[in-house]
Image (cartoon, rainbow, N blue to C red):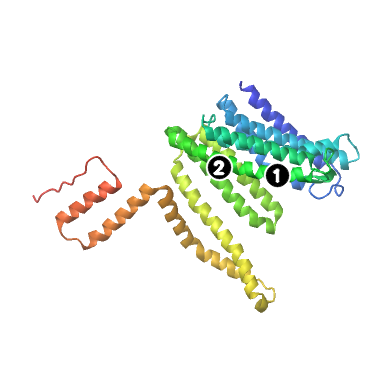
Amino acid sequence: MTSRVPLGVWLLTMAMIAVGLTLIAVVPGGRTPEGANLGDALPVLPQPLTAAAVGALICWQRPGNRVGMLLSLIGLITATQYLAAGYSIFGSFSDHRLPFTDIAAWFFSWGGAAVGFCADLILFTFPERPLDLRSTRLGIACAVGGSLAFLIALAIVPGRLFNIAWVQNPFGWTGAEPAILVLLGSTAALFIAAVFFAARSLMVRYQTADRRERLQLKWFFVGLIFTLVGMIVSVPLGLVNFAIAKVGVALAVSAIPIAIAIAILREHLYDIDIVINRALVYGATTAGIAVAFFAGIVVLQAVLRPFTNGSEIAVAASTLTSVALAQPLRARMQEAVDRRFYRSRYDAVRTLDAFSVRLRDEVDLDAVRAELVDAVRDTVQPVHASLWLRGQP
Protein backbone atom coordinates (compact mmCIF):
# COMPACT_ATOMS: atom_id res chain seq x y z
CA MET A 1 0.00 0.00 0.00
CA THR A 2 1.55 3.28 -1.11
CA SER A 3 1.40 6.37 1.07
CA ARG A 4 -1.22 7.91 -1.24
CA VAL A 5 -3.84 5.23 -0.53
CA PRO A 6 -4.25 5.83 3.25
CA LEU A 7 -4.24 9.59 2.61
CA GLY A 8 -6.90 9.19 -0.05
CA VAL A 9 -9.06 7.00 2.21
CA TRP A 10 -8.75 9.53 5.03
CA LEU A 11 -9.66 12.46 2.76
CA LEU A 12 -12.66 10.53 1.41
CA THR A 13 -13.77 9.75 4.99
CA MET A 14 -13.48 13.38 6.07
CA ALA A 15 -15.31 14.56 2.94
CA MET A 16 -18.27 12.22 3.48
CA ILE A 17 -18.57 13.19 7.14
CA ALA A 18 -18.44 16.89 6.24
CA VAL A 19 -21.08 16.50 3.51
CA GLY A 20 -23.35 14.47 5.81
CA LEU A 21 -23.14 17.02 8.62
CA THR A 22 -23.68 19.89 6.19
CA LEU A 23 -26.82 18.25 4.79
CA ILE A 24 -28.18 17.87 8.32
CA ALA A 25 -27.24 21.43 9.29
CA VAL A 26 -28.94 23.14 6.33
CA VAL A 27 -32.36 21.63 7.06
CA PRO A 28 -34.55 24.44 8.47
CA GLY A 29 -34.93 24.26 12.20
CA GLY A 30 -38.07 22.74 13.63
CA ARG A 31 -38.71 20.43 10.68
CA THR A 32 -36.65 17.45 11.76
CA PRO A 33 -37.96 15.01 14.38
CA GLU A 34 -36.13 14.13 17.57
CA GLY A 35 -32.84 12.37 16.86
CA ALA A 36 -32.41 13.88 13.38
CA ASN A 37 -30.59 17.14 14.06
CA LEU A 38 -26.98 18.25 14.27
CA GLY A 39 -26.94 18.02 18.06
CA ASP A 40 -27.56 14.28 17.82
CA ALA A 41 -24.83 13.69 15.23
CA LEU A 42 -21.97 15.68 16.77
CA PRO A 43 -21.59 13.86 20.15
CA VAL A 44 -20.52 10.60 18.48
CA LEU A 45 -18.14 12.31 16.02
CA PRO A 46 -14.89 11.64 17.99
CA GLN A 47 -15.23 7.92 17.33
CA PRO A 48 -14.96 7.92 13.49
CA LEU A 49 -12.53 10.84 13.45
CA THR A 50 -10.11 9.04 15.76
CA ALA A 51 -10.42 5.69 13.97
CA ALA A 52 -9.87 7.25 10.54
CA ALA A 53 -6.90 9.36 11.64
CA VAL A 54 -5.16 6.52 13.46
CA GLY A 55 -5.85 4.07 10.63
CA ALA A 56 -4.38 6.45 8.03
CA LEU A 57 -1.34 7.15 10.21
CA ILE A 58 -0.61 3.47 10.81
CA CYS A 59 -1.08 2.54 7.14
CA TRP A 60 1.25 5.38 6.17
CA GLN A 61 3.96 4.48 8.69
CA ARG A 62 3.47 0.68 8.57
CA PRO A 63 2.23 -0.25 5.07
CA GLY A 64 0.29 -3.49 5.06
CA ASN A 65 -0.57 -3.42 8.77
CA ARG A 66 -4.00 -5.05 9.05
CA VAL A 67 -5.04 -3.18 12.19
CA GLY A 68 -4.48 0.12 10.41
CA MET A 69 -6.57 -1.11 7.47
CA LEU A 70 -9.41 -2.16 9.79
CA LEU A 71 -9.39 1.21 11.57
CA SER A 72 -9.48 3.01 8.24
CA LEU A 73 -12.39 0.80 7.19
CA ILE A 74 -14.25 1.61 10.43
CA GLY A 75 -13.84 5.32 9.73
CA LEU A 76 -14.94 4.87 6.11
CA ILE A 77 -18.07 2.86 6.99
CA THR A 78 -19.06 5.34 9.71
CA ALA A 79 -18.51 8.22 7.29
CA THR A 80 -20.80 6.48 4.80
CA GLN A 81 -23.40 6.28 7.57
CA TYR A 82 -23.06 10.03 8.18
CA LEU A 83 -23.52 10.67 4.48
CA ALA A 84 -26.54 8.35 4.29
CA ALA A 85 -28.13 9.97 7.36
CA GLY A 86 -27.54 13.46 5.96
CA TYR A 87 -28.97 12.52 2.58
CA SER A 88 -32.04 10.92 4.16
CA ILE A 89 -32.72 13.86 6.54
CA PHE A 90 -32.10 16.52 3.89
CA GLY A 91 -34.16 14.70 1.28
CA SER A 92 -37.06 14.13 3.67
CA PHE A 93 -37.37 17.45 5.55
CA SER A 94 -35.87 20.19 3.39
CA ASP A 95 -37.50 22.06 0.52
CA HIS A 96 -35.55 19.91 -1.94
CA ARG A 97 -37.00 16.42 -1.78
CA LEU A 98 -34.66 13.66 -2.98
CA PRO A 99 -35.33 10.10 -4.15
CA PHE A 100 -34.41 6.92 -2.27
CA THR A 101 -34.18 8.60 1.11
CA ASP A 102 -35.65 5.47 2.71
CA ILE A 103 -32.88 3.36 1.14
CA ALA A 104 -30.23 5.68 2.60
CA ALA A 105 -31.88 5.47 6.02
CA TRP A 106 -32.09 1.69 5.68
CA PHE A 107 -28.33 1.49 5.07
CA PHE A 108 -27.65 3.73 8.05
CA SER A 109 -29.74 1.49 10.33
CA TRP A 110 -27.60 -1.62 9.84
CA GLY A 111 -24.23 -0.06 9.00
CA GLY A 112 -23.21 -0.25 12.63
CA ALA A 113 -23.11 -4.05 12.38
CA ALA A 114 -20.29 -3.77 9.84
CA VAL A 115 -18.42 -1.40 12.16
CA GLY A 116 -18.82 -3.89 15.01
CA PHE A 117 -17.45 -6.68 12.83
CA CYS A 118 -14.30 -4.69 12.02
CA ALA A 119 -13.86 -3.91 15.72
CA ASP A 120 -14.12 -7.63 16.56
CA LEU A 121 -11.45 -8.45 13.99
CA ILE A 122 -9.06 -5.96 15.63
CA LEU A 123 -9.20 -8.03 18.83
CA PHE A 124 -7.93 -11.05 16.91
CA THR A 125 -5.51 -9.21 14.61
CA PHE A 126 -3.65 -6.80 16.91
CA PRO A 127 -0.83 -5.88 16.54
CA GLU A 128 -0.31 -7.17 12.97
CA ARG A 129 -2.02 -10.45 12.04
CA PRO A 130 -4.17 -13.20 13.61
CA LEU A 131 -2.52 -16.11 15.39
CA ASP A 132 -2.73 -19.50 13.70
CA LEU A 133 -4.82 -21.03 16.49
CA ARG A 134 -8.05 -22.97 16.52
CA SER A 135 -9.53 -20.55 19.07
CA THR A 136 -8.68 -17.64 16.78
CA ARG A 137 -10.38 -19.23 13.80
CA LEU A 138 -13.44 -20.09 15.90
CA GLY A 139 -13.55 -16.56 17.29
CA ILE A 140 -13.39 -14.96 13.85
CA ALA A 141 -16.13 -17.33 12.66
CA CYS A 142 -18.30 -16.31 15.63
CA ALA A 143 -17.65 -12.62 14.90
CA VAL A 144 -18.64 -13.11 11.25
CA GLY A 145 -21.76 -15.09 12.16
CA GLY A 146 -22.84 -12.68 14.88
CA SER A 147 -22.36 -9.60 12.70
CA LEU A 148 -24.25 -11.18 9.79
CA ALA A 149 -27.12 -12.27 12.07
CA PHE A 150 -27.41 -8.77 13.55
CA LEU A 151 -27.18 -7.13 10.12
CA ILE A 152 -29.90 -9.35 8.66
CA ALA A 153 -32.17 -8.80 11.66
CA LEU A 154 -31.89 -5.02 11.32
CA ALA A 155 -32.29 -5.15 7.55
CA ILE A 156 -35.57 -7.13 7.53
CA VAL A 157 -37.28 -5.96 10.72
CA PRO A 158 -40.77 -4.74 9.81
CA GLY A 159 -42.05 -1.36 10.83
CA ARG A 160 -39.81 1.56 11.67
CA LEU A 161 -36.06 1.37 11.19
CA PHE A 162 -33.65 0.88 14.05
CA ASN A 163 -32.32 4.29 15.22
CA ILE A 164 -34.47 6.09 12.60
CA ALA A 165 -38.00 6.05 13.98
CA TRP A 166 -39.43 8.35 11.30
CA VAL A 167 -38.72 5.95 8.37
CA GLN A 168 -40.52 2.72 7.56
CA ASN A 169 -38.24 -0.15 6.57
CA PRO A 170 -38.51 -0.43 2.77
CA PHE A 171 -37.41 -4.07 2.97
CA GLY A 172 -39.30 -5.00 6.13
CA TRP A 173 -40.49 -8.60 6.17
CA THR A 174 -43.94 -8.81 7.69
CA GLY A 175 -44.32 -11.89 9.82
CA ALA A 176 -40.58 -12.32 10.31
CA GLU A 177 -40.65 -11.46 14.03
CA PRO A 178 -39.90 -15.06 15.18
CA ALA A 179 -36.96 -15.30 12.79
CA ILE A 180 -35.68 -11.90 13.94
CA LEU A 181 -35.82 -12.98 17.58
CA VAL A 182 -33.80 -16.09 16.68
CA LEU A 183 -31.26 -13.95 14.83
CA LEU A 184 -30.92 -11.54 17.76
CA GLY A 185 -30.51 -14.42 20.20
CA SER A 186 -27.86 -15.94 17.94
CA THR A 187 -26.13 -12.56 17.76
CA ALA A 188 -25.87 -12.37 21.56
CA ALA A 189 -24.56 -15.95 21.88
CA LEU A 190 -22.05 -15.56 19.05
CA PHE A 191 -20.86 -12.21 20.40
CA ILE A 192 -20.20 -13.71 23.85
CA ALA A 193 -18.33 -16.61 22.22
CA ALA A 194 -16.28 -14.19 20.08
CA VAL A 195 -15.27 -12.17 23.16
CA PHE A 196 -14.25 -15.39 24.95
CA PHE A 197 -12.12 -16.57 22.02
CA ALA A 198 -10.64 -13.09 21.62
CA ALA A 199 -9.58 -13.06 25.28
CA ARG A 200 -8.07 -16.52 24.81
CA SER A 201 -6.21 -15.39 21.69
CA LEU A 202 -4.84 -12.28 23.40
CA MET A 203 -3.70 -14.32 26.39
CA VAL A 204 -1.83 -16.81 24.18
CA ARG A 205 -0.36 -13.99 22.14
CA TYR A 206 0.93 -12.28 25.30
CA GLN A 207 2.44 -15.52 26.64
CA THR A 208 4.31 -16.24 23.40
CA ALA A 209 5.23 -12.65 22.48
CA ASP A 210 8.64 -11.05 22.55
CA ARG A 211 9.37 -7.93 24.60
CA ARG A 212 8.26 -5.46 21.91
CA GLU A 213 4.96 -7.22 21.25
CA ARG A 214 4.25 -7.45 24.97
CA LEU A 215 4.66 -3.68 25.24
CA GLN A 216 2.23 -3.27 22.36
CA LEU A 217 -0.29 -5.57 24.03
CA LYS A 218 0.02 -3.67 27.30
CA TRP A 219 -0.84 -0.42 25.54
CA PHE A 220 -3.79 -2.15 23.90
CA PHE A 221 -4.99 -3.36 27.31
CA VAL A 222 -4.75 0.22 28.63
CA GLY A 223 -7.08 1.38 25.86
CA LEU A 224 -9.54 -1.40 26.66
CA ILE A 225 -9.48 -0.50 30.37
CA PHE A 226 -10.13 3.19 29.71
CA THR A 227 -12.95 2.31 27.32
CA LEU A 228 -14.58 -0.06 29.78
CA VAL A 229 -14.36 2.39 32.68
CA GLY A 230 -15.59 5.27 30.53
CA MET A 231 -18.62 3.30 29.39
CA ILE A 232 -19.41 2.21 32.96
CA VAL A 233 -19.25 5.81 34.18
CA SER A 234 -21.34 7.02 31.21
CA VAL A 235 -24.25 4.70 32.05
CA PRO A 236 -25.35 6.59 35.21
CA LEU A 237 -24.59 9.89 33.45
CA GLY A 238 -27.23 8.95 30.88
CA LEU A 239 -29.85 9.17 33.60
CA VAL A 240 -28.90 12.81 34.17
CA ASN A 241 -28.01 14.01 30.67
CA PHE A 242 -28.17 11.68 27.68
CA ALA A 243 -26.12 13.98 25.40
CA ILE A 244 -23.23 14.07 27.88
CA ALA A 245 -23.40 10.29 28.17
CA LYS A 246 -23.14 9.96 24.37
CA VAL A 247 -20.05 12.16 24.35
CA GLY A 248 -18.57 10.11 27.19
CA VAL A 249 -19.12 6.83 25.35
CA ALA A 250 -17.64 8.23 22.12
CA LEU A 251 -14.55 9.52 23.95
CA ALA A 252 -14.20 6.23 25.83
CA VAL A 253 -14.30 4.20 22.62
CA SER A 254 -11.78 6.62 21.06
CA ALA A 255 -9.24 5.55 23.69
CA ILE A 256 -8.73 2.24 21.87
CA PRO A 257 -7.50 3.74 18.55
CA ILE A 258 -5.26 6.15 20.46
CA ALA A 259 -3.74 3.28 22.45
CA ILE A 260 -3.29 1.29 19.23
CA ALA A 261 -1.47 4.22 17.62
CA ILE A 262 0.94 4.47 20.55
CA ALA A 263 1.40 0.69 20.68
CA ILE A 264 2.25 0.26 17.01
CA LEU A 265 4.18 3.47 16.39
CA ARG A 266 5.72 4.68 19.69
CA GLU A 267 5.43 1.90 22.25
CA HIS A 268 9.12 1.98 23.22
CA LEU A 269 8.99 5.56 24.55
CA TYR A 270 6.97 4.94 27.68
CA ASP A 271 7.02 2.90 30.88
CA ILE A 272 3.70 1.26 30.21
CA ASP A 273 3.63 -0.73 33.47
CA ILE A 274 3.10 2.49 35.42
CA VAL A 275 0.28 3.54 33.09
CA ILE A 276 -1.42 0.14 33.39
CA ASN A 277 -1.12 0.16 37.17
CA ARG A 278 -2.61 3.64 37.47
CA ALA A 279 -5.32 2.87 34.92
CA LEU A 280 -6.39 -0.26 36.80
CA VAL A 281 -6.32 1.41 40.20
CA TYR A 282 -7.99 4.71 39.37
CA GLY A 283 -10.34 3.14 36.83
CA ALA A 284 -11.61 0.60 39.35
CA THR A 285 -11.77 3.28 42.05
CA THR A 286 -13.78 5.62 39.82
CA ALA A 287 -16.20 2.86 38.84
CA GLY A 288 -16.61 1.83 42.48
CA ILE A 289 -17.28 5.40 43.63
CA ALA A 290 -19.79 5.93 40.81
CA VAL A 291 -21.67 2.76 41.72
CA ALA A 292 -21.62 3.66 45.43
CA PHE A 293 -22.80 7.22 44.70
CA PHE A 294 -25.82 6.27 42.62
CA ALA A 295 -26.67 3.24 44.75
CA GLY A 296 -26.48 5.46 47.82
CA ILE A 297 -28.90 7.94 46.27
CA VAL A 298 -31.43 5.21 45.51
CA VAL A 299 -31.15 3.55 48.93
CA LEU A 300 -31.08 6.77 50.97
CA GLN A 301 -33.98 8.28 49.07
CA ALA A 302 -36.04 5.17 49.75
CA VAL A 303 -35.16 5.28 53.47
CA LEU A 304 -35.41 9.03 54.02
CA ARG A 305 -38.39 9.84 51.79
CA PRO A 306 -40.94 9.67 54.65
CA PHE A 307 -38.87 12.17 56.68
CA THR A 308 -37.42 14.56 54.08
CA ASN A 309 -40.40 15.20 51.78
CA GLY A 310 -38.35 14.94 48.59
CA SER A 311 -35.44 17.15 49.67
CA GLU A 312 -31.86 16.71 48.45
CA ILE A 313 -30.54 15.25 51.71
CA ALA A 314 -30.04 11.84 50.09
CA VAL A 315 -27.87 13.34 47.33
CA ALA A 316 -25.77 15.29 49.83
CA ALA A 317 -25.34 12.26 52.09
CA SER A 318 -24.38 10.04 49.16
CA THR A 319 -21.85 12.62 47.97
CA LEU A 320 -20.21 12.87 51.41
CA THR A 321 -20.14 9.07 51.70
CA SER A 322 -18.50 8.73 48.27
CA VAL A 323 -15.85 11.32 49.17
CA ALA A 324 -15.13 9.50 52.43
CA LEU A 325 -14.79 6.18 50.56
CA ALA A 326 -12.41 7.52 47.90
CA GLN A 327 -9.07 7.15 49.72
CA PRO A 328 -9.76 3.80 51.49
CA LEU A 329 -11.16 2.38 48.25
CA ARG A 330 -8.11 3.54 46.28
CA ALA A 331 -5.78 1.91 48.81
CA ARG A 332 -7.73 -1.36 48.64
CA MET A 333 -7.70 -1.28 44.84
CA GLN A 334 -3.94 -0.61 44.79
CA GLU A 335 -3.32 -3.60 47.04
CA ALA A 336 -5.64 -5.81 44.97
CA VAL A 337 -4.00 -4.78 41.67
CA ASP A 338 -0.48 -5.32 43.04
CA ARG A 339 -1.45 -8.71 44.45
CA ARG A 340 -3.20 -9.88 41.26
CA PHE A 341 -1.13 -8.37 38.42
CA TYR A 342 2.19 -7.34 40.01
CA ARG A 343 2.77 -10.27 42.34
CA SER A 344 6.56 -10.01 42.44
CA ARG A 345 6.40 -6.34 43.41
CA TYR A 346 3.68 -7.06 45.96
CA ASP A 347 5.72 -9.87 47.53
CA ALA A 348 8.84 -7.69 47.57
CA VAL A 349 7.05 -4.90 49.42
CA ARG A 350 5.63 -7.33 51.95
CA THR A 351 9.06 -8.91 52.47
CA LEU A 352 10.71 -5.54 53.07
CA ASP A 353 7.95 -4.47 55.44
CA ALA A 354 8.33 -7.68 57.43
CA PHE A 355 12.12 -7.25 57.49
CA SER A 356 11.84 -3.70 58.84
CA VAL A 357 9.51 -4.91 61.60
CA ARG A 358 11.93 -7.67 62.65
CA LEU A 359 14.91 -5.31 62.45
CA ARG A 360 13.50 -3.04 65.14
CA ASP A 361 13.70 -5.77 67.78
CA GLU A 362 16.89 -7.52 66.59
CA VAL A 363 20.20 -6.75 68.33
CA ASP A 364 22.33 -9.71 67.28
CA LEU A 365 24.60 -8.72 64.35
CA ASP A 366 24.73 -12.22 62.83
CA ALA A 367 20.93 -12.46 62.93
CA VAL A 368 20.61 -9.05 61.25
CA ARG A 369 23.05 -10.13 58.55
CA ALA A 370 21.14 -13.35 57.89
CA GLU A 371 17.79 -11.51 57.79
CA LEU A 372 19.19 -8.92 55.34
CA VAL A 373 20.58 -11.56 52.99
CA ASP A 374 17.26 -13.43 53.05
CA ALA A 375 15.34 -10.23 52.29
CA VAL A 376 17.62 -9.47 49.32
CA ARG A 377 17.16 -12.99 47.97
CA ASP A 378 13.36 -12.83 48.30
CA THR A 379 13.00 -9.42 46.68
CA VAL A 380 15.80 -8.98 44.11
CA GLN A 381 16.36 -12.74 43.59
CA PRO A 382 20.07 -12.54 42.64
CA VAL A 383 22.13 -15.57 41.63
CA HIS A 384 24.30 -15.10 44.72
CA ALA A 385 23.97 -12.84 47.76
CA SER A 386 26.44 -12.19 50.59
CA LEU A 387 27.14 -9.42 53.09
CA TRP A 388 30.59 -8.06 53.88
CA LEU A 389 31.15 -5.99 57.03
CA ARG A 390 34.26 -3.91 57.44
CA GLY A 391 36.04 -4.62 60.67
CA GLN A 392 37.06 -2.07 63.27
CA PRO A 393 40.16 -0.01 62.25
- Quarter of the figure with residue 42: top right
> Residue at position x 66%, y 34% from top?
74
Residue 219, x across and y down, in percent: 50, 40
Q: Nearer the viewer, residue 376 or 323?
A: 376
How many numbered discs?
Answer: 2
Reply above or below: 69 against 357: above
Q: Earlier in the sequence, mark 2 or mark 1?
A: 1
The residue sitting at the top extreme is 2
> Seen in the image, is 108 located left or right of residue 328?
right
Give SS at disc 2.
helix
Q: Position of residue 257 (x, y in %)?
A: 59, 38
Q: Residue at x 45, y 33 (%)?
A: 212
Quarter in which the N terminus is drawn: top right
Query: Is 383 left or right of 393, judged from the image as shown?
Result: right
Instruction: State the residue position of label 1.
Output: 184
Circle 1 sits in a helix, a strand or a loop, which is it? helix
The three-letter code of the residue at mark 1 reads Leu
State which quadrant residue 11 falls in. top right
Residue named by callout 2: 196
The numbered disc on residue 126 is none
Rendered image quadrant of residue 356: bottom left
At label 2, the amino acid type is Phe
Q: Do we see residue 22 in this rendering?
A: no
Task: Specify the farthest residue to the left.
Answer: 393
Count residues near mark 2 (Cα–Cα under 10 Å), then give few for <14, some for 14-19, many for 20+: few
**Percent of width and height locating residue 338:** 41, 51
Q: Is residue 171 left or right of residue 208?
A: right
- Residue 12 visible, this angle: yes
Residue 91 rendering spot, x and y as whole percentages: 87, 38
* Distance CA(mark 2)–CA(mark 1): 19 Å
Above or below — where is 135 with respect to 29? above
